[in-house]
Image: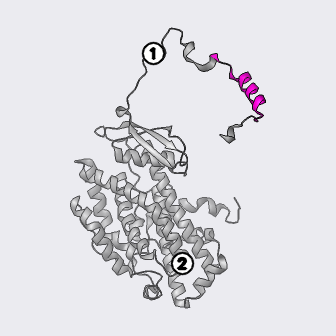
Amino acid sequence: MTDEAPESASVDGPPATVRQEPWEVFRQEKEGDPMTHGGSVMAPDAELAMHYARELYGRRQESSRLWVVRRADIGVLEDPDLLQPPLDRSFKKPGGYVMRDKLADARARTGATKKVASDR
Amino acid sequence: MTTTRLGLAAAFPPDTLHALEGLLGAMADDELVLGYWDSEWTGIAPMLEEDVAMSSLAQDEIGHARALYALLGELRDEDPDHLAYDRDVADLRHARLLDHPRTDWAFSIARRWLYDEADAVRLEALAGSAFSPLAELVGKIRREEVYHRLHATAWLRRLADADGEPRERLLAAWRTLLPDAATVFTPLDGEQRLVAAGVIAATNGELETRWRQDIGGTCRELGLAVPGPAADPMHGRTTHGEAVAWLWGEATMVRRLDPEATW
């Protein structure tokens, strides 16, 4: 018995000819949950991307469904002029209306009790 | 549960029970040794994602071994860890196909594909086993093996279809592995009794023929030789050689420090 692994192989990285690209992985924790972004994997094609997504985001039974999408196929919108325009847009937000007191009054009138999140 | 399982096994004549223990031990040793070889890729696989994948596959195989040793342990009323680890390398009964070291990536993929396809045939023959605890376990193992085979086949195709170095390395692996590929089906002592008792659906000889039929199409399509009979069938599961002696030293190193330690 020796200390060295027999016929130890070279551990070069993948050859330059193998083109890899990023794939985005979305996961659903359990049936009915929304799909959320889990992360990404590098893979040369859709089949291996699916295998790697399974290993990185599902091998511990933490997912009930995975979506694997080539990053290049995702439409991206990030133009601040479209998403974060400089003029005041506060009138488009619902924060202007304070509902809390009105709801309390309405409950008092009808005798309803306050709903808690788990009742929804 | 234990009583039921032992009760089921006690219904077999002693010869049949002995053969059943041999079958469980051989399968468990196959999975354990392959799991340890493939775990040698952890940290140095060709890319990060594949590193995680291969390590996870290796863990799956060791998990299958663990479940098989547990079943064997119930039959013999012995501790599964003791059955698995407190042995000399000469007492291992894995197939000779698994004697070869990890070598390079193409070699590990070729071996895994040859073994997984053989294992699939063996598992199919056990799916309806008259020894129901084994049928139950095999049902679970087969569900994990679906992914293992997809992974191995995906890589085999990529290596075989690539020109130059990847295909050359695969062909080199094929030349080394082919004489030992069929050793997964080395006949086991008393296997006729297991067939008669309905523990397994067919003899190893019949399973080997099925395996060759199953993989023949893919081999021909990829321009790879179809494995013939084992070159040394008398030592299909014995006389394991230096590489496995090294691996076994690694695998049992910590346990040998203090076999009585609890973790």
Q: Residue type at mark 1?
A: Pro
Residue A8 image position (x, y, % from top left): 41, 52
Check disc 2 and report the residue beneath it.
B132
The correct choice, above or below, for B1 with respect to B98 in the image is below
* Label 1 crowd (10 A; few <14 / some 14-19 / many >=20): few
B130 with respect to B184 (left or right): right
Where disc 2 sits, the SS reads helix
At horizontal 63% and vertical 16% (from top left) the residue drawn is A96
Residue B213 image position (x, y, % from top left): 28, 71
Magenta residues span A96-112
In front of the other: B215 or A101? A101
Residue B70 image position (x, y, % from top left): 59, 71
* Label 2 crowd (10 A; few <14 / some 14-19 / many >=20): some
In front of the other: A21 or B160? A21
Instruction: Check residue B151 for magenta coloring.
Output: no
Check disc 1 and report the residue beneath it.
A80
Q: Main secondary structure of the magenta part?
A: helix
Looking at the rendering, which quadrant does residue B241 occupy?
A: bottom left
Q: Residue type at mark 2?
A: Ser
The correct choice, above or below, for A41 with respect to B74 in the image is above
In front of the other: B64 or B241? B64
Report in which chain the residue with disc 2 lies. Answer: B
Can residue A2 be seen at all in this image of the molecule? no
